[in-house]
Amino acid sequence: MDEIKLYKYYDECPCELVQYARRYFEWMLASAYSKHTVESRSRDLKDFLVWCEARSILRPQEVTYQMLESYRRHLYHQRKSDGNRLNLKTQHLRLGAIKGLFKWLAKSNFILYNPASDLDLPRLGYPLPKGVLGLEDIEKVFDAVDVRNRLGIRDRAILETFFSTGVRRRELSGLKIDDVNFFSKTVMIREGKWKKDRLIPIGDSALFWVGKYLNEVREDYVVEPDEGYLFLNRDGRKINHDYLSQMVSSYLAKAGVGKKGFSCHSLRHGMATEMLNQGVDIRLIQEMLGHSSIASTQIYCRLSIKKLKEVHAKTPMGYGLDKYQELIKN
């Protein structure tokens, strides 16, 4: 599996359970799961496999529901290097990876029954997104870019595209030149999350900066053979999504809006919230963001305070009881 990055542990540990995990990852790749998903699943499973090995649980047939419940308690009490407990999302991902592995083992008839079938995952709830930028903050971020040089023109085009389209950083990293249509003012997102394609609009300002970047900058960065990716780093390769995080964070800090929890997703959050403030139907925003569930998009309804304030202002709670009594008398 040279195409994905696994921990050395998966190559070096001879125990049967670990080797079945490798076969599970191979099945995922053959079933069109993304490399990112497979690598994440391997990361989430590693702690459980090490835990099993330390207790001489070396074969999948030896794993019982009671053992999985014991591991769940282990996760709950586990401490990170900073002394804090694992958050619920991390616990959810690790237990979810176990359920996926044993479901595959049972379905493939490697085990007689699935010991993880009744394993409940922690309830995550729907916390509000962190690091939501308002329009004034986003304008400050754009102004923080020095567009007098080539790197600044590229970065401004990236920031404008993030905000105009609300794409994820991996989706932006994978954009190719042909994915941007300047005539129809659209962007094709190919194999986004859950391997889904979607066609979304892009605004005039973003198109202006992308066009300027293509006309004045990109050719100087290209190293043959040119694979056609839209945004390139200085070495002529596709811009890395981790680099995008560092780049956006640096501009947020330069603009004075870079607080803890702010990242590339802050521009995505800002776009979605502003669209709701402008009265855009939530189903259209769901399609724009590429959410598989409307529940993910509805989180932004709780962030969109503008409409709520307008309605609240027209109630007795908004204009006060004195004025309310006066209106009733009149």
Image: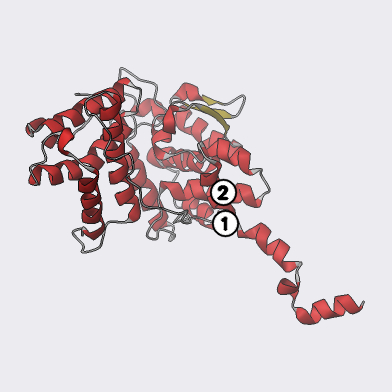
Q: Is residue 66 left or right of residue 249?
A: left
Q: Position of residue 140 (x, y in %)?
A: 50, 55
Q: Which residue is mark 1?
A: 302
In percent of the image, x 18 and y 59: which residue is there? 81
Residue furthest to the right in view is: 330
Return the residue nearer the eye: 154 or 163.
163
Q: Is residue 231 left or right of residue 38?
A: right
User: How dense is the environment of label 1, judged by Cα within 10 Å: few (below 14), some, or many (20 and up)?
Assistant: few
- The circle on residue 8 is none
In percent of the image, x 87 and y 76: which residue is there? 328
In percent of the image, x 43 and y 33: which residue is there? 193
Q: Is residue 68 left or right of residue 129?
A: left
Quadrant occupied by the N terminus: top left
From what the image shows, is residue 260 above or below residue 323?
above
Q: Are marks 1 and 2 in contact (CB under 8 Å)?
A: yes
Q: Quadrant of residue 95?
A: top left
Amino acid on which the number 1 mark rests in the picture: Arg
Q: CA distance from mark 1 to mark 2?
A: 7 Å
Q: Which residue is mark 2?
A: 298
The number of discs equals 2
